[in-house]
Amino acid sequence: MGEIENNHDLKESKVSQIVSLFADVPPQKDIMIFIDDVFAEAKVRLEEMAKTAKAAYYEDIFDEQLERLRSLGCPAFIINKLKTHKVDVISRVCSLDIVENRNPLIPVIPNQYLTIYSQLAMINLNGMTGDTDLESSRILNVLKKGLSQNDSKIFDGIYFILDIDDGANTEKLTSVEANEKIKGKNRSPLTVEEIIALLLQRNEPLDSNLLAGGSRYEQDDIAPICTVEKDKIWLKTCFTNTIHPNSVTPSCGMRI
């Protein structure tokens, strides 16, 4: 009851302020024009406040993810390189319309900066780390084939993926079918390094196996997949034209 009374008092106070504001309308000014001006100014201020709040929200996520990497043992020079992307990443992610169940941004570390073996070992899903028997030199980035030489350079340095979907809508599809569905929505399947980047930011165990639809292992019909086996996250392979139970293909909307 006390809370209700406080809310009522607050509303009464705000109403009094509004009434007082309109009581000060200049005599020579039409009341409707004055009201329009007031609401137009209020709208601009609210939009600016919303933009500031949105940027602050994504900045917190950015900082938390870099701190997460640091706590997992990521080298300081990589953390420092990621920090230099902050302004561009926040600006770009603020311009996107990201739905609630998607991750807005995730930092990605290419194998040439930190090997996939080191990154897999850094994974910590309630104490569960990652491992693989695959040769990193045999993992191919098939996304580069459809990009110009200039555009494909994004994969050569440290970068971020934005607007990440967990792939729940691809569960009963083959890797080939999932990739077609993802590309039809102007999105992109993730590479091995991007799947590992996603896992590095998780605390909870995997609900599904994660297919790296943007990568292949030696052959066009073999894709890498992250799966739970013997209390570890294992990077293995699967055939791209076979449906694998409880497997999904995550995607992203942009790389920067």
Image (cartoon, rainbow, N blue to C red):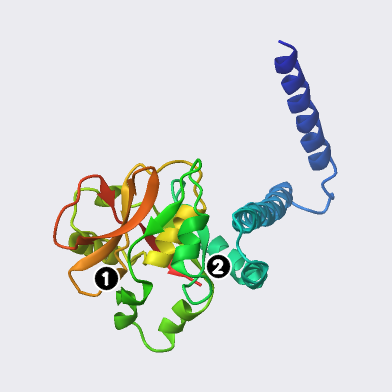
Residue 203 locus on image (x, y percent): 51, 44
Q: Residue at x 50, y 63 (%)?
A: 118
Q: Residue at x 64, y 73 (%)?
A: 81
Q: Which mark is residue 217?
A: 1
Q: Secondary structure at mark 1?
A: strand
Q: Quadrant of the N terminus?
A: top right
Location of residue 155 (image quadrant): bottom left
Front-most of residues 177 and 184: 177
Q: Residue furthest top?
A: 1
Q: Residue at x 70, y 16 (%)?
A: 4
**Mark 2: amino acid:** Arg
In this rendering, the label closer to the viewer, 2 or 1: 1
Residue 98 seen: no
Q: Residue furthest bottom?
A: 149
Judge left or right: residue 251 versus residue 171: right
Mark toward the start of the polypeptide (2 vs 1): 2
Residue 53 locus on image (x, y percent): 67, 52
Judge left or right: residue 54 versus residue 161: right
Location of residue 218 (image quadrant): bottom left
Residue 194 locus on image (x, y percent): 43, 64
Judge left or right: residue 223 versus residue 164: left
Residue denoted by label 2: 92
Residue 255 locus on image (x, y percent): 46, 70
**Mark 1: amino acid:** Tyr
